[in-house]
Amino acid sequence: MAEDLMEGLMSARINPGRAYCSLHRSSVVPNYTPQVCRRVSVGPIGMLRHPKSFKVLEMWRNANAVCFDVDSTVCLDEGIDELAEFCGAGKAVAEWTSRQDLFCKYGMAMSGSVPFEEALAARLSLFNPSHSQVQDFLEKRPPRISPGIDELIKKLKDSNTAVYLISGGFRQMINPVASILGIPPENIFANQLLFGSSGEFLGFDTNEPTSRSGGKAAAVQQIRKAFGYKALVMIGDGATDLEARKPGGADLFICYAGVQHREAVAVKADWLVFNFRDLISSLE
């Protein structure tokens, strides 16, 4: 068990640098960053002995609830990009996604100066998916799950840790993912595509918290308030996932860079991992 934990931590980048002093960060929780930290050759024992590293591990191991982003975290793809490509508008929508990544790279919100809801509406308007197109997409393009995520979620559930999916994507595409992973529908916070009586595209439900800027953070706060979790962790790849670490929200943010390595996000994460095996090993 100890060897597995050491091996997992060796593949994670941990920087025992200065801690943030804002209310949402404990003074003993480290800031993990592959960019700022001085590169020193240390073995796993040295990393394990660092008191701040232990604090993060302790918080992760004692989490009552873990919230996962879906696109480029639980799944290998960006759902809206895949749907757009299927509907013949892949290039146009991918340009929007690339623009968001560019903003993220330079430390801005994922949707930059454009509110999330406006960016989402703009991308959908490029292809206006019908109900039949979405159903056809789901039948022909089953979700591609990230390696190790099924094992990690099973391990968390076996330890009575609640698991949630929080996404700016759509329930129609996330429900099959949740079914594969054994996550109940009530533990999904995502957007909902709306269709008319003839199956024509009408838009998306703006009442969902994830349909707006800051929506993931609001969803995490809602979860915590409803169930009173003492320790809650957010895992994702993007700036909107990082935002969930705030007072009343997530205590810990783990950046998963196994699909997309967004440096501006990783530099502010509590723990940066490239493989879910790192997290599985740390629980053994």
Image (cartoon, rainbow, N blue to C red):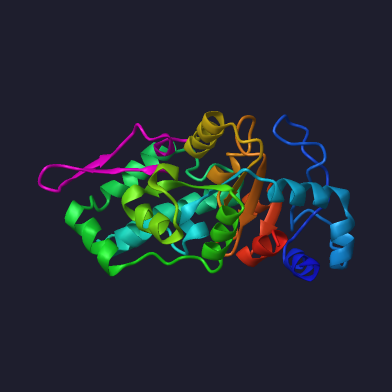
Residue 96 visible? The answer is yes
Q: For this rendering, which residue is in front, 174 or 112?
A: 174
Q: Is residue 276 left or right of residue 113?
A: right
Residue 31 visible? The answer is no
Residue 212 point in image, percent of width and height = 42, 35
Q: Is residue 162 magenta?
A: no
Q: Is residue 207 magenta?
A: yes
- Relative to 228, say whether 5 is above or below: below
Give the extent of the magenta segment.
188-213
Quarter of the image for the C terminus: give it. Answer: bottom right
Q: Is residue 206 left or right of residue 258?
A: left
| Residue drawn at the location 66% of the way across and 60% of the way down | 279
Residue 148 point in image, percent of width and height = 56, 67
Q: Is residue 97 left or right of residue 202?
A: right
- Relative to 187, say whether 140 is above or below: below
- Relative to 268, say whether 217 is above or below: above
Q: For this rendering, which residue is in front, 112 or 231?
A: 231
| Residue drawn at the location 69% of the way across and 33% of the way down | 24
Residue 79 point in image, percent of width and height = 38, 57
Q: For this rendering, which residue is in front, 201 or 184?
A: 184
